[in-house]
Amino acid sequence: MGETLVAVADDIVPDATVTFAPETLRAALDAPRLFDARIPEFASGIRIDGHELTAQYLLQLLKRPEPRVLTRFGYAHELAPRWLEDVPEYDTPDPARVVESLVASMPLCLRGVLDWPALDWSLDELIARHGSMPLRHDSVAGRPETLGDFLGSWRGAAAGADAPYSAGCPLSAQLAALFPFPLFAAGAYHPVAQLWAGVRREHTLVTPLHRDIAASFLAQVHGHKKLRLYAPSQRDLLYPIDGFNTYQPCCVDAAQPDLARFPRFAQARPIEVTVGPGDLLVIPTGWFHCVWALDDVISVSRFMDDTWAVTRHAAVQRASA
């Protein structure tokens, strides 16, 4: 393909190797605040061999945050509560409540507020209806992978760390149209939806501990997920990586922490929430979180910029004054 990200001595067997097409590596180095290996334009020029998680950490080293992201995290640290007993739950889709929670940096879970037809489809029905739609580039096969290819790979797959998982790959506009987000006009959300789907992984994480640079709306379509959330004020207990742009991962494995390497993690205090089909979980900017798949699962997420929520809240306040 071209250039490798790392080189190793002849007598060392690497856990992972990342190989770049030359033009892809140049693009990544030129845009460290935008680079993301899940984006098709980058993914088609990258090949990963070996341990996937190790490779992802290598790719993180190319990333850099924008200054405004660090400012957002600072606001979240000041606004968010240091501890909650539970994630607040509601069964009505109240946009004003959601905006108020985002402005106050409070997570919340809306139970049963989604009414998408896909909630009632089995995996086989989803494949029959939309399996021919392209999902992402398959760097091993050198061709596009369809939604049907991906869902079909679940059959017979063993639960565990190597089970198939989509890891937030962007959805095409055609696939995203199956999952129109409620509460706000489409323009309130980031234009790209992400798919988080795969085989049950009850004892290992499907999404490692991290925090996003915008508010995250996680919509559960199929199966159940368990999430742990940590307030922004717990940053120093969670060992986040300095190299990041669209999200900030942590070094510690929250499912099986190595307390000899990461002793402060023993002091971290999470809150847990489980989401099922029809639920919508709202995670404010800067809240750390990780995810387990209790079943075979399909989730779709979108982001919302803090500026939109703050502007909306201010407009409501003025109107009610």
Image (tube, rainbow, N blue to C red):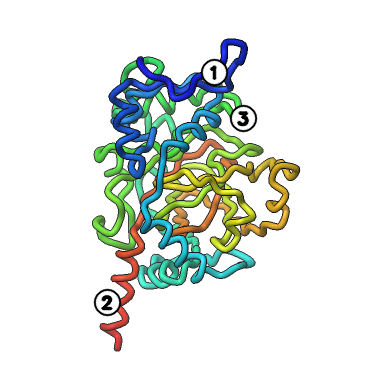
Q: Which mark is residue 301?
A: none
How far across and down, in percent of the image, does residue 10 sit?
57, 10
Question: Residue 79 location in percent, x, y?
Answer: 49, 71
Q: Residues within 10 Å of mark 3 (few under 14, many from 20)?
A: some
Which one is earlier in the sequence, the residue at label 3 or at label 1? 1
- Distance CA(mark 3)–CA(mark 1): 29 Å
Q: Is residue 115 above or below residue 311?
A: above
Between 30 and 135, the residue placed more toward the observer is 30
- Give SS at disc 2: helix
Left or right: 165 as drawn, with respect to 85: left
Q: Nearer the viewer, residue 204 or 197?
A: 204
Q: Which residue is mark 3?
A: 160
> 89 or 172, which lies in front?
172
Which quadrant would residue 20 be assigned to in this image?
top left
| Quadrant of the rendered image containing residue 251 | top right
Residue of label 2: 315
The residue at which mark 1 appears reads as 8
Looking at numbered disc 3 in the image, what kind of residue is underneath it? Gly
Residue that lies at the very extreme toward the front in this rendered image: 9
Q: Nearer the viewer, residue 233 or 190?
A: 233
Q: Write the residue at 45% across / 23% down.
A: 18
**Image quarter hosting the N terminus:** top left
In the rendering, at what x and y percent does residue 277 appear?
47, 49
Assign the C terminus to one quadrant of the image. bottom left
Mark 2 vs mark 3, foreground winner is 2
In which quadrant of the rendered view does residue 85 lie? bottom right
Give the tally of numbered discs. Answer: 3
